[in-house]
Image (tube, grey):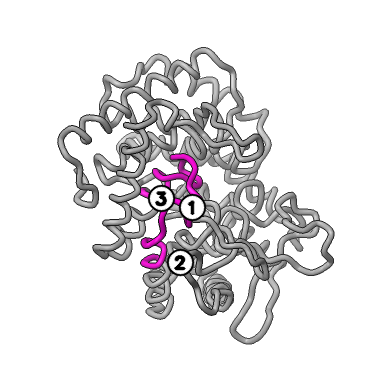
Amino acid sequence: MSTVFRLEPADKALVYELIETLSKKVANHLSETTIPHGLLSGLAGELLFLFKAHQFNPEFVDESVFQEQLDVLQEGLGEQSLELSNGLAGQAWLLEYFNQSTPDEYDPELLSEIDELFTNALKRSPWSGELEMVLGLAGYSPYAARRARHADQTELFDAIVSGFESTVSQLNLKHLTWAQPKESVYLFDRESKDAEYNLGLAHGVPGIIAALLPAVRVPSLTLRTKRLLEGGCEWLLAQRNPKHDDYACFGTCVGDQHRSRLGWCYGDLTIALTLARVGLELQRDDFIESALEIALHSASRDESSAVIYDAGLCHGSLGLATIFQAMNQLLPHPELAAAADRWLHIFLANYKEKGESALYFYDAQNKCYTENFGFLMGYSGMALSLIGVMDDQLDWIDSLLMA
């Protein structure tokens, strides 16, 4: 049991029960429904949860259902697009994650053809596609970083670093950054002719920085990558609100007057996590100090200022519990541990009051709550958070550029 989360026996039993309940729901969903194969909202993400649930308690998951659906995933690899969200980059990350789960049986050649496929696909100079992680260049980094634990990924990382070098804006001697591509589907203002700089981990500069970080460990790429990391972090810190109030230290993009929410996709907390990771890797105490200050400010925010409507990983209460847990693992601090615990108990109180509907995803477009079984927004991600509450293991968060 994690020392971060303080659970009374009844609440511990409730978390255990919820993991089992969600295991059955997701398994039934896969047995009854044909869904896209993606990691963030499809089959791969649900298989990730069932795999972890089986590790947690083998009785929670029918292995035959899991194997049947894994076969479906593998048989469909040749029909996939390449990006992380719905495509091969996310699914290949999952297969490598599974491959590494049994070190004595690890097969280094299992995904060698995918290494070559990605390397050839990313060798474009200048890079002309999306830069962010969900659909773009940054989304290949989780796979490359996971594979690099056992297989040489120099060529793939070189393609990733080269792509970001080809699109970087060097603003001065210290600051560099990346504007959203003019054709990006994630532009906030499509009519403006000015460059737009996104500040979210999912779709902006923090995600690019996080995607570059593993490449700094490749000897031939260290100097090139370090330049991008340091210049990007210096620029990012310069975008901090001059005087933050009870809300955010950063906006959602440069120049916007809106207070950013608190979540994985956008907001101060994953910016802090990214700065901390870079600071620790490069031994930059100034980045580490800033990261801790921003994270501690985030720890003071409530449901209203954090804009929390549901429990999902992306921007919900259990997502915040997990991110604060990860932040505390990097930079242990009693206020970060307390924040992780508080967000868990906010979820539990909501569940006790509302029952199953507390597990539903809030659809902001249609302003309603609905069932969602996926990794990023739904049951699978929530249950992964709950498993992390019980065992303090977050070995899957690299898929979301958080490790």
Q: Closer to the camera, 363 or 292? A: 363
Secondary structure under tag 2 reads loop
Which image quadrant: the C terminus?
A: bottom left
Looking at the picture, how far across and down is residue 113, in whole percent? Answer: 59, 39
Q: Mark 2 Cα within 10 Å, few/some/many (few <14, many 20+)?
A: few
User: Do residues under tags 1 and 3 come within 8 Å of each other at their CB atoms?
Assistant: yes
Tell me how far mark 1 sits from mark 2, CA to CA: 16 Å
State the residue position of label 3.
320
Residue 130 is left or right of residue 193, and the answer is left
Looking at the image, which residue is at 35% across and 16% down?
62
| Three-letter amino acid code of the residue under disc 2 | Asp
Secondary structure under tag 3 reads helix
Secondary structure under tag 1 reads loop
Looking at the image, which residue is at 49% across and 67% down?
216
Looking at the picture, how far across and down is residue 282, in whole percent? Answer: 42, 74
* Count of number-bearing discs: 3
- Which residue range is magenta in the image? 295-321
| Three-letter amino acid code of the residue under disc 1 | Gly
Closer to the eye: label 1 or 2? 2
State the residue position of label 1.
263
Tell me how far mark 1 sits from mark 3, CA to CA: 6 Å
Say the numbered circle drawn on residue 246: 2
- From the viewer's perspective, is residue 388 above or below residue 72? below
Residue 371 highlighted magenta (yes or no): no
Sequence-wise first label, 1 or 2: 2
Looking at the picture, how far across and down is residue 354, in whole percent? Answer: 39, 30
Residue 41, by quadrant, is top right
| Three-letter amino acid code of the residue under disc 3 | Leu
